[in-house]
Image (tube, coloured by chain):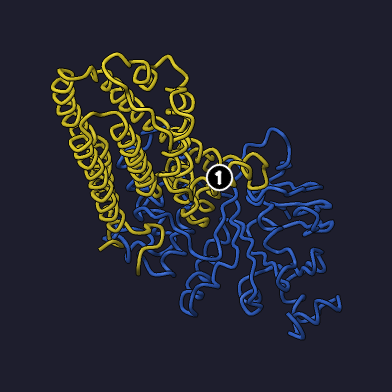
Chain colours: A yellow, B blue
Amino acid sequence: MNAMMTRALRKQERVSQCITFIILGSVGIPIWNVLQKTYAADTEAASAATPLNTLSPPLDNLYTVLSISFVAILFGIACAFYLQEWLPQTNWVRRFIESIVAILGGVPSIFYGILATGIFFSYAGTLKTIGVVRAPQGPGDGAALESLSFPHDTPVFYIVVLTFILMVMPLTIKTTQAALRSVATPIREAAYALGASHWQVLKTQVIPIALTQILAAGCRAMSSALATVALIFGIYVWQYTDAPGEMSNRFVLFLSSALLFSIFSSILIKLCTSASADPAHPTR
Amino acid sequence: MNHSIETENLSLWYGDFQALMDVSVKIPDGQITSLIGPSGCGKTTLLRCFNRVNERYGNVTTEGKIEVLGKNIYDADVSLPELRKAVGMVFQRPNPLPISVYENILFGLRIHSPMRSITRADADEIVEEALKSVFLWTDLKDKLKTRATSLQLEQQQKLCIARLLPLKPKIILMDEPCSALDAKGTRAVEELMEILAGTYTFIIVTHNMAQARRVSKECIFMFLGELIEHRETQALFTDPQHEKTSDYVHMRYG
C-alpha cells in the first residue's frame, strides 16, 4: 500500500502527524492544571498550620521552563539543520558540537536533574550538598524557603533554564541529524543535477521525507524534559512539606502522568512512523 | 564539426589524490560519445565535471578549462542552476524522486520557474510529451499519480531521462545508465538514446565494451586519470593505437 501512496495521501498523513504533535504538546497543560489546583488547595489547608504558601511560585516557574524547553527544541532542530546541511563534515565547529552531542545525548535525564538540583541548592546557599537538608524550622523561618523559590530575576532561574536546554538540545540535535542523514544521497543528487538550489532540495525533498522523524525527535526531547520536571518537583516536595505522605502521593501522581505521557507519545510516534516507514525506499 | 564540450588541460584533485591529469578533449555535437576504461580511471569524475556536480563532495580542486557550449563553466558569472539545466544527468542507479510520476517530470520545470506559473493544461501537455518521447506514455498514462519509486527499474531509468527533457537540455550525461538493468531494459534505453541522439549530445560512461561499441560514434579511453585515446569507436576497437588501449579492448585486464 505504501508504494502506491500518492502525494495527496502523504499530505493527509503529514497533517495528522502535525496534529498529533500539537496534541502531545498540550497534554502536559491539563495535567499541570490539575496538579496546580490540588496543590493550591493543599497549601491553603497547610497554611493554616504553617506558612508554606511560598511553595507555589516555583511550580509556575517550572511551567515557564517547560515552554522554554519547547523553544529550545525548535532551536535544536534549526541547529541540526545547520550542522548537517551547511557545514562540511571536516569543519571543526561541527566535529566539536557533534562530539559534545554524542556524549551528552547518552546521559540519562536523572543526571541532569541531579546536576540542576546540585547547582540549584548550593547556589541558593541553603544547602552545601544535596545530602544535607535543612528543613524549615517553623513559622518564623521563611529564609530557607524564599531562597528556594526561584523568581525570574535570580541566577537560580537561569541555572534551571540552562539545565533544561542542556538536556533537551543534544537529544534533539542527535535525532534530527539522524533524520536528515536518512534521506538517501541519490535523491539529493537527482534534485541537484536538475539544477535545484540547496534550499530547493531541502524544501521539496529533504524536509518532506525527514519530517516524521524530526517530529518524533521533538516529542522525545519534550518527554525527557517532563521527566526531569518530575524529578525536580519530587525533590522539592520531599524536602519542604510538613505532610510528607500526602505530598509524595502528589509526586507519584505527577511522575506517573509524565511516564504515561512518554509512553503515550512514543506509541503514537511508532504508529505515525510505521505508516510511512522509509519513504525513500518503499518495498517493491 | 561543432563541439559541445571542450576541455583544456583539465586536472582535478580530491584532497591530495589527483583523479584527472591534463585531460584535453573535444566532444562533438549531437552524437553519442562513450567513456571507457578500468575502474578508478576517472571516467565518472570527468563526467561529473561537466555539470560541476562533483563539487558537492567538498575538498575538490580543479585546474584548467572546461567550455560547455562555448562558455567556460568555471567563470565567476556562471550560474549552477542554469548550467545544470543545460547539462542533464542520468545516474547509475535509477533515482526518481519519491513523488508521483507526474511531479517527477515537472520537478525540473517547477524549480526553474516562479511559483504557480505553470498552468494545469500546460503541465499535462508537458508530461505527455516527455513520456511520449521516451515511449512510456502508453504504459504510464493511467499511473501518473503513482509514486515513481514503485515503477519497474527500466521504467524508472526511462523516467529519469524523461524528466530532463522539459528543461530542454543540450547535453545529457549518463553514468553507467544500464548497469542496474537487465538485457531487455538495457536494449530499451540504448534504443532510446539512439533515437534521441540527433537532438541531444550524449556522453555515456560504461563498463560494458559491447555497449560502447553498439551505441557510440566516438569513444574515449581513459587510464589512471589520463586520456589515452579518443577516436571513432570502430577504429578504436579494431585498430587501437596505444598499447594500453589494445590491452583493455582485448580484455587482457580491467
Q: Determine which quarter of the picture holds residue B77.
A: top right
Question: Does residue B68 appear left or right of residue B190 in this picture?
Answer: right
Q: Residue B46's x, y, as percent?
A: 71, 58
Question: Residue at 26% across / 16% down in the picture?
Answer: A139
Give the residue displayed 55% in from the left and 73% down from the top.
B179
Quarter of the figure with the N terminus of chain A:
bottom left
- Amino acid type at image mark 1: Lys
Whole-percent x, y for residue B68 in the image: 69, 47
Q: Is residue B54 above or below residue A76?
A: below
Q: Residue at x 35, y 67 (%)?
A: A283
Tell me if residue A166 comes above or below residue A216 in the rendering.
Answer: above
Residue at the extreme front: A137
Q: Chain of mark 1?
A: B
In the figure, B85 relative to B204: above or below? above
Query: Which residue does the numbered mark 1 point to in the structure image?
Result: B85
Q: What is the crowding at mark 1: few (fewer than 14 residues within 10 Å), some, or many (at least 20)?
A: many
